[in-house]
Amino acid sequence: MMLDRSWRKSTYSGDMDSGSCVEVSLAGDALVRDSKAAGGDVLAFSVYAWRAFVVSVA
């Protein structure tokens, strides 16, 4: 269930209360959401797709 997932955002986001970034939850897959709309739409990616994205932007 999505409510049981732990969500994280980058330490590069600055003030953790500003809410102006995306959050990711990793638990067998990668879910991504807008931190300003935590109850809104969520994008789902396979672990392989998420890893490829992270490697390409690192």
Image (cartoon, rainbow, N blue to C red):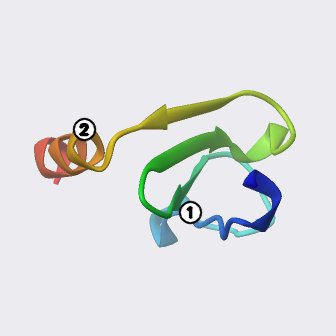
Q: Type of residue at label 1?
A: Lys
Residue 13 occupies quadrant:
bottom right
Q: Quadrant of residue 49?
A: top left
SS assignment at label 1? loop
Give the residue number, with chain letter if any, for mark 2: 49
Which residue appears farthest toward the right when viewing the image? 39
Please give left or right for residue 55 compared with residue 9 in the image: left
What residue did someone put label 1 on?
A: 9
Labels in figure, total: 2
* Near-viewer residue (56 or 5): 5
Residue 32 position within the rendered picture, expressed as x and y whole percent measured from the top left: 55, 42
Residue 38 lies, in percent from the top left, at: 81, 45
- How many neighbours does mark 1 have within 10 angstroms: few (below 14), some (14-19), or many (20 or more)? some
Q: Please report the residue visible at 75 percent of the width from the left and 55 percent of the height from the top.
A: 1
- Residue located at (12% from left, 42% from top): 56
Q: Nearer the viewer, residue 13 or 45?
A: 45
Q: Left or right? Give the position of 6 relative to 9.
A: right
Please determine whether, in this image, residue 52 is positioned above or below residue 18. above
Give the residue at x 42% y 59%. 28
Three-letter code for the amino acid on which mark 2 is drawn? Ala
Q: Residue at x 19, y 44 (%)?
A: 57
